[in-house]
Amino acid sequence: MNLSQRLWDTSAVPTATMGYGTWKARTSWSSIGGGGTLDITIGRVSSGRIVELATAGLSDLAGDHFDESLGRVGMRMFQDRQKVSADKVKMSPAADDRFRVECERTKIRLSEEDSQRIELGDFARVVDEAFDLSEVIRREEFEAEIKAITEQALTKVNVALQAANLTSRQVDLALLIGGSSLIPLVQHQLREMFGHTVVSVENANSIIAEGAAIVDAMNLQPSFAASVALELSDGKSYEVFKAGELAIPSTCRKTVNLFCTDNRDGQARLVVGLTEPANGEFKRKRIITLPVSSELPSPYNHERVTAEFAVDQDLVLHIDAKAATQSRGEHEEVVDLKFALTITGADE
Protein backbone atom coordinates (compact mmCIF):
# COMPACT_ATOMS: atom_id res chain seq x y z
CA MET A 1 0.00 0.00 0.00
CA ASN A 2 1.29 3.47 -0.83
CA LEU A 3 1.54 5.81 2.11
CA SER A 4 0.06 9.20 1.31
CA GLN A 5 2.39 12.05 2.15
CA ARG A 6 1.63 13.70 5.44
CA LEU A 7 2.86 17.16 6.36
CA TRP A 8 3.44 18.50 9.82
CA ASP A 9 4.57 21.90 11.05
CA THR A 10 8.13 21.95 12.37
CA SER A 11 8.19 24.79 14.90
CA ALA A 12 8.65 23.90 18.58
CA VAL A 13 5.11 24.67 19.66
CA PRO A 14 3.27 22.58 17.02
CA THR A 15 5.63 19.72 17.81
CA ALA A 16 3.58 19.51 20.97
CA THR A 17 0.45 18.93 18.92
CA MET A 18 2.00 15.66 17.86
CA GLY A 19 2.22 14.61 21.48
CA TYR A 20 -1.30 15.82 22.23
CA GLY A 21 -2.80 14.23 19.11
CA THR A 22 -4.36 17.46 17.77
CA TRP A 23 -3.60 16.35 14.22
CA LYS A 24 -6.05 13.45 14.44
CA ALA A 25 -9.26 15.42 14.16
CA ARG A 26 -8.97 19.18 14.43
CA THR A 27 -9.52 21.51 11.50
CA SER A 28 -8.07 24.71 12.93
CA TRP A 29 -5.85 25.08 15.96
CA SER A 30 -3.64 27.48 17.83
CA SER A 31 -0.67 26.42 19.94
CA ILE A 32 0.48 28.90 22.57
CA GLY A 33 3.53 28.37 24.75
CA GLY A 34 7.03 27.15 24.08
CA GLY A 35 10.25 26.08 25.71
CA GLY A 36 12.21 29.17 26.66
CA THR A 37 10.30 31.67 24.50
CA LEU A 38 6.71 32.66 23.80
CA ASP A 39 5.69 31.03 20.52
CA ILE A 40 2.28 31.17 18.85
CA THR A 41 1.46 29.05 15.82
CA ILE A 42 -1.83 28.90 13.92
CA GLY A 43 -2.36 25.77 11.85
CA ARG A 44 -5.02 23.85 10.00
CA VAL A 45 -5.66 20.14 9.57
CA SER A 46 -6.79 19.21 6.08
CA SER A 47 -6.70 15.89 4.23
CA GLY A 48 -4.29 14.31 6.68
CA ARG A 49 -1.98 17.32 6.70
CA ILE A 50 -1.10 19.88 9.36
CA VAL A 51 -0.15 23.09 7.61
CA GLU A 52 1.22 26.20 9.27
CA LEU A 53 -0.90 29.28 8.60
CA ALA A 54 0.92 31.86 10.69
CA THR A 55 3.40 32.28 13.52
CA ALA A 56 4.23 35.03 15.99
CA GLY A 57 5.95 35.36 19.32
CA LEU A 58 8.30 37.17 21.63
CA SER A 59 11.79 35.72 21.43
CA ASP A 60 12.95 37.68 24.47
CA LEU A 61 10.05 36.62 26.71
CA ALA A 62 10.45 33.36 28.58
CA GLY A 63 9.44 31.66 31.79
CA ASP A 64 12.36 33.17 33.67
CA HIS A 65 10.80 36.61 33.16
CA PHE A 66 7.89 35.45 35.31
CA ASP A 67 10.37 34.11 37.87
CA GLU A 68 12.08 37.50 37.96
CA SER A 69 8.73 39.23 38.40
CA LEU A 70 7.92 37.05 41.37
CA GLY A 71 11.40 37.74 42.74
CA ARG A 72 10.73 41.48 42.62
CA VAL A 73 7.57 40.97 44.67
CA GLY A 74 9.46 38.94 47.26
CA MET A 75 12.33 41.41 47.40
CA ARG A 76 9.99 44.37 47.95
CA MET A 77 8.28 42.52 50.78
CA PHE A 78 11.66 41.74 52.34
CA GLN A 79 12.77 45.36 52.09
CA ASP A 80 9.51 46.62 53.57
CA ARG A 81 9.75 44.19 56.48
CA GLN A 82 13.36 45.08 57.21
CA LYS A 83 12.74 48.78 56.46
CA VAL A 84 15.77 49.03 54.18
CA SER A 85 16.32 50.38 50.68
CA ALA A 86 17.38 48.19 47.75
CA ASP A 87 20.93 49.52 47.74
CA LYS A 88 21.45 48.27 51.30
CA VAL A 89 20.61 44.66 50.47
CA LYS A 90 23.62 42.59 49.40
CA MET A 91 23.28 39.07 48.01
CA SER A 92 26.07 36.64 47.25
CA PRO A 93 26.13 34.94 43.82
CA ALA A 94 25.24 31.62 45.49
CA ALA A 95 22.28 33.18 47.29
CA ASP A 96 21.13 34.81 44.07
CA ASP A 97 21.15 31.43 42.31
CA ARG A 98 19.19 29.81 45.16
CA PHE A 99 16.73 32.71 45.08
CA ARG A 100 16.06 32.15 41.37
CA VAL A 101 15.34 28.47 41.98
CA GLU A 102 13.03 29.32 44.87
CA CYS A 103 11.19 31.88 42.72
CA GLU A 104 10.53 29.27 40.05
CA ARG A 105 9.28 26.79 42.65
CA THR A 106 6.99 29.41 44.17
CA LYS A 107 5.66 30.41 40.74
CA ILE A 108 4.74 26.80 40.01
CA ARG A 109 3.00 26.36 43.38
CA LEU A 110 1.02 29.58 42.89
CA SER A 111 -0.59 28.00 39.83
CA GLU A 112 -2.30 25.60 42.25
CA GLU A 113 -2.58 27.61 45.47
CA ASP A 114 -3.82 31.11 46.36
CA SER A 115 -0.68 31.90 48.34
CA GLN A 116 2.75 30.45 48.87
CA ARG A 117 5.59 31.14 51.27
CA ILE A 118 8.97 31.84 49.70
CA GLU A 119 11.78 30.91 52.08
CA LEU A 120 15.54 31.06 51.83
CA GLY A 121 18.16 30.78 54.54
CA ASP A 122 21.07 33.22 54.59
CA PHE A 123 19.24 35.23 51.93
CA ALA A 124 21.04 38.54 52.12
CA ARG A 125 23.13 40.86 54.25
CA VAL A 126 22.06 44.31 55.35
CA VAL A 127 25.18 46.16 56.44
CA ASP A 128 26.97 43.29 58.25
CA GLU A 129 23.94 41.38 59.49
CA ALA A 130 22.67 38.22 57.73
CA PHE A 131 18.94 37.77 57.16
CA ASP A 132 16.76 34.87 56.06
CA LEU A 133 13.88 35.30 53.63
CA SER A 134 10.40 34.19 54.65
CA GLU A 135 7.51 35.97 52.94
CA VAL A 136 4.03 34.90 51.92
CA ILE A 137 3.20 35.90 48.34
CA ARG A 138 -0.41 35.88 47.24
CA ARG A 139 -1.33 34.88 43.72
CA GLU A 140 -3.04 38.22 43.07
CA GLU A 141 0.18 40.06 43.95
CA PHE A 142 2.16 37.94 41.51
CA GLU A 143 -0.43 38.34 38.75
CA ALA A 144 -0.51 42.12 39.20
CA GLU A 145 3.27 42.11 38.66
CA ILE A 146 3.08 40.10 35.43
CA LYS A 147 -0.08 41.55 33.89
CA ALA A 148 1.82 43.90 31.58
CA ILE A 149 3.87 40.96 30.28
CA THR A 150 0.83 38.77 29.60
CA GLU A 151 -0.99 41.62 27.84
CA GLN A 152 2.05 42.11 25.63
CA ALA A 153 1.92 38.41 24.80
CA LEU A 154 -1.78 38.63 23.92
CA THR A 155 -1.04 41.23 21.26
CA LYS A 156 1.15 38.65 19.54
CA VAL A 157 -1.71 36.14 19.57
CA ASN A 158 -3.80 38.70 17.70
CA VAL A 159 -0.92 39.27 15.25
CA ALA A 160 -0.85 35.55 14.44
CA LEU A 161 -4.63 35.37 14.03
CA GLN A 162 -4.64 38.35 11.66
CA ALA A 163 -1.81 36.88 9.61
CA ALA A 164 -3.79 33.63 9.30
CA ASN A 165 -6.95 35.57 8.30
CA LEU A 166 -8.82 33.98 11.18
CA THR A 167 -10.74 35.19 14.21
CA SER A 168 -10.55 33.58 17.63
CA ARG A 169 -14.05 32.15 17.04
CA GLN A 170 -12.75 30.18 14.07
CA VAL A 171 -10.15 28.33 16.16
CA ASP A 172 -11.34 24.86 17.14
CA LEU A 173 -8.62 24.25 19.70
CA ALA A 174 -6.27 26.56 21.62
CA LEU A 175 -3.60 24.33 23.08
CA LEU A 176 -1.61 25.79 26.00
CA ILE A 177 1.82 24.24 26.50
CA GLY A 178 4.93 24.99 28.50
CA GLY A 179 5.17 25.60 32.24
CA SER A 180 4.16 29.27 32.14
CA SER A 181 0.88 28.38 30.41
CA LEU A 182 -0.25 26.92 33.76
CA ILE A 183 -0.36 30.39 35.35
CA PRO A 184 -4.07 31.07 36.09
CA LEU A 185 -3.90 34.66 34.76
CA VAL A 186 -2.56 33.41 31.42
CA GLN A 187 -5.31 30.81 31.20
CA HIS A 188 -7.99 33.34 32.15
CA GLN A 189 -6.90 35.86 29.52
CA LEU A 190 -6.78 33.22 26.80
CA ARG A 191 -10.17 31.82 27.76
CA GLU A 192 -11.58 35.32 27.39
CA MET A 193 -10.18 35.29 23.85
CA PHE A 194 -10.84 31.71 22.74
CA GLY A 195 -13.62 30.57 25.09
CA HIS A 196 -14.19 26.86 25.66
CA THR A 197 -11.67 25.85 22.97
CA VAL A 198 -8.75 26.48 25.35
CA VAL A 199 -7.10 23.27 26.54
CA SER A 200 -4.39 23.28 29.19
CA VAL A 201 -2.70 19.90 28.95
CA GLU A 202 -1.65 18.12 32.14
CA ASN A 203 1.81 17.36 30.79
CA ALA A 204 2.43 20.93 29.61
CA ASN A 205 6.07 20.83 30.73
CA SER A 206 6.95 17.71 28.75
CA ILE A 207 4.60 17.63 25.78
CA ILE A 208 7.05 19.38 23.42
CA ALA A 209 9.65 16.71 24.15
CA GLU A 210 7.03 13.99 23.72
CA GLY A 211 6.02 15.41 20.35
CA ALA A 212 9.65 15.64 19.30
CA ALA A 213 10.07 11.95 20.20
CA ILE A 214 7.13 11.09 17.95
CA VAL A 215 8.65 13.14 15.13
CA ASP A 216 11.89 11.19 15.49
CA ALA A 217 10.14 7.82 15.76
CA MET A 218 8.14 8.50 12.60
CA ASN A 219 11.32 9.64 10.79
CA LEU A 220 9.72 12.88 9.69
CA GLN A 221 11.78 15.20 7.48
CA PRO A 222 11.42 18.99 7.07
CA SER A 223 9.75 20.23 3.91
CA PHE A 224 8.42 23.53 2.60
CA ALA A 225 4.80 24.28 3.51
CA ALA A 226 4.81 27.24 1.08
CA SER A 227 6.98 27.69 -1.99
CA VAL A 228 9.98 30.02 -1.83
CA ALA A 229 9.62 32.18 -4.92
CA LEU A 230 10.92 35.24 -6.77
CA GLU A 231 8.67 37.97 -8.11
CA LEU A 232 9.47 38.66 -11.79
CA SER A 233 9.19 41.94 -13.68
CA ASP A 234 6.05 40.78 -15.50
CA GLY A 235 4.22 40.18 -12.22
CA LYS A 236 4.56 36.42 -12.31
CA SER A 237 6.56 34.40 -9.80
CA TYR A 238 9.29 31.79 -10.17
CA GLU A 239 9.40 29.02 -7.58
CA VAL A 240 12.89 28.35 -6.26
CA PHE A 241 11.82 25.67 -3.77
CA LYS A 242 8.35 24.23 -4.23
CA ALA A 243 5.88 23.42 -1.46
CA GLY A 244 6.29 19.79 -0.45
CA GLU A 245 9.98 19.61 -1.37
CA LEU A 246 12.29 18.42 1.39
CA ALA A 247 14.26 21.18 3.09
CA ILE A 248 17.38 19.13 3.78
CA PRO A 249 20.54 21.29 3.92
CA SER A 250 22.71 18.81 2.00
CA THR A 251 20.41 18.90 -1.03
CA CYS A 252 18.44 22.13 -0.64
CA ARG A 253 20.67 24.37 -2.79
CA LYS A 254 19.85 26.11 -6.04
CA THR A 255 21.43 28.69 -8.35
CA VAL A 256 19.13 30.93 -10.39
CA ASN A 257 20.24 33.20 -13.23
CA LEU A 258 18.11 36.28 -13.81
CA PHE A 259 18.37 39.43 -15.92
CA CYS A 260 17.85 42.98 -14.70
CA THR A 261 15.36 44.59 -17.10
CA ASP A 262 15.80 48.16 -15.82
CA ASN A 263 19.31 49.16 -14.80
CA ARG A 264 18.99 52.92 -15.22
CA ASP A 265 19.49 53.65 -11.51
CA GLY A 266 22.40 51.21 -11.20
CA GLN A 267 20.43 48.85 -8.98
CA ALA A 268 18.67 45.52 -9.32
CA ARG A 269 15.98 44.40 -6.90
CA LEU A 270 15.50 40.75 -6.04
CA VAL A 271 12.03 40.28 -4.55
CA VAL A 272 11.83 37.11 -2.45
CA GLY A 273 8.61 35.76 -1.00
CA LEU A 274 6.32 32.82 -0.41
CA THR A 275 3.70 31.40 -2.75
CA GLU A 276 0.77 29.78 -0.98
CA PRO A 277 -0.07 26.38 -2.50
CA ALA A 278 -3.80 26.83 -1.90
CA ASN A 279 -4.30 29.94 -4.03
CA GLY A 280 -0.92 30.73 -5.61
CA GLU A 281 -0.82 34.11 -3.87
CA PHE A 282 2.67 35.62 -3.64
CA LYS A 283 3.61 37.32 -0.36
CA ARG A 284 6.77 39.41 -0.24
CA LYS A 285 9.32 38.66 2.48
CA ARG A 286 12.48 40.47 1.39
CA ILE A 287 13.64 42.94 -1.26
CA ILE A 288 17.37 42.59 -1.87
CA THR A 289 18.95 45.59 -3.59
CA LEU A 290 22.28 45.01 -5.31
CA PRO A 291 24.47 47.11 -7.63
CA VAL A 292 24.46 46.64 -11.41
CA SER A 293 26.03 48.59 -14.24
CA SER A 294 23.89 51.47 -15.51
CA GLU A 295 25.78 51.56 -18.83
CA LEU A 296 26.22 48.16 -20.44
CA PRO A 297 28.38 47.84 -23.56
CA SER A 298 26.55 47.20 -26.85
CA PRO A 299 24.84 44.90 -27.76
CA TYR A 300 23.90 44.02 -24.15
CA ASN A 301 20.67 45.50 -22.77
CA HIS A 302 20.17 43.44 -19.63
CA GLU A 303 22.70 42.44 -16.98
CA ARG A 304 22.77 38.92 -15.62
CA VAL A 305 22.22 38.52 -11.89
CA THR A 306 23.14 35.21 -10.27
CA ALA A 307 21.37 34.28 -7.04
CA GLU A 308 22.31 31.29 -4.91
CA PHE A 309 19.80 29.88 -2.45
CA ALA A 310 20.59 27.48 0.42
CA VAL A 311 18.84 26.31 3.59
CA ASP A 312 20.98 25.58 6.65
CA GLN A 313 20.43 23.13 9.50
CA ASP A 314 18.38 25.73 11.40
CA LEU A 315 16.05 26.08 8.38
CA VAL A 316 17.32 29.59 7.69
CA LEU A 317 17.32 30.53 4.00
CA HIS A 318 20.58 32.10 2.83
CA ILE A 319 20.59 34.16 -0.37
CA ASP A 320 23.75 35.36 -2.11
CA ALA A 321 23.20 37.52 -5.20
CA LYS A 322 25.68 39.28 -7.50
CA ALA A 323 25.53 41.00 -10.88
CA ALA A 324 27.86 39.86 -13.66
CA THR A 325 29.74 43.20 -13.91
CA GLN A 326 30.17 43.68 -10.17
CA SER A 327 32.81 42.39 -7.79
CA ARG A 328 30.54 42.82 -4.77
CA GLY A 329 27.22 41.15 -4.15
CA GLU A 330 24.68 41.02 -1.34
CA HIS A 331 23.88 38.42 1.31
CA GLU A 332 20.49 38.08 2.99
CA GLU A 333 19.01 35.64 5.51
CA VAL A 334 15.30 34.86 5.71
CA VAL A 335 14.01 33.18 8.86
CA ASP A 336 10.23 33.57 8.62
CA LEU A 337 9.49 30.84 6.08
CA LYS A 338 6.81 28.17 6.40
CA PHE A 339 7.92 24.60 6.95
CA ALA A 340 6.31 21.24 7.47
CA LEU A 341 7.37 17.73 8.34
CA THR A 342 6.84 14.95 5.87
CA ILE A 343 6.93 11.18 5.89
CA THR A 344 8.90 9.99 2.90
CA GLY A 345 7.89 6.33 3.08
CA ALA A 346 6.66 4.59 -0.04
CA ASP A 347 5.37 1.05 0.17
CA GLU A 348 4.19 -0.68 3.28
Image (cartoon, helix red, strand yellow):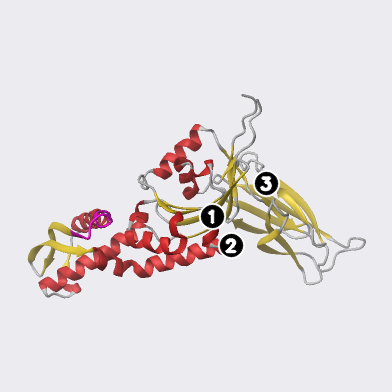
Dot 2: within a 10 Å radius of its alpha carbon, few (fewer than 14), some, or many (20 or more) residues?
some
Mark 3 lies on residue: 243
Q: Are marks 2 and 1 in contact (CB under 8 Å)?
A: yes
Q: Residue furthest front?
A: 196
Element at label 2 = helix
Residue 239 pos. (x, y %): 73, 50
Mark 1 lies on residue: 42
Mark 2 lies on residue: 163
Instruction: Tell me if residue 33 is in the magenta stretch.
Output: no
Query: Gap in Å between the C-alphas at discs 3 and 2?
Result: 19 Å
Mark in front: 3 vs 1: 1
Q: Are marks 3 and 1 in contact (CB under 8 Å)?
A: no
Under mark 1, the amino acid is Ile
Q: Residue at x 72, y 61 (%)?
A: 270
As drawn, 149 above or below 106: below
Under mark 3, the amino acid is Ala
Q: Residue furthest left?
A: 129
Upstream in the sequence, badge 3 or badge 1?
1
Q: Residue at x 69, y 51 (%)?
A: 278
Mark in front: 3 vs 2: 2
Which quarter of the image is occupied by the N terminus? top right
Magenta-drawn segment:
108-116
User: Quarter-wise, where is residue 143 in the image?
Assistant: bottom left
Query: Gap in Å between the C-alphas at discs 2 and 1?
Result: 9 Å
Query: Gap in Å between the C-alphas at discs 3 and 1?
Result: 18 Å
Instruction: Answer with left or right where residue 284 lies relative to residue 62.
Output: right
Q: Residue at x 23, y 67 (%)?
A: 73
As drawn, 9 above or below 293: above
Residue 144 pos. (x, y %): 30, 70
Element at label 3 = loop
The numbered dot on residue 142 is none
Q: Residue furthest right?
A: 299
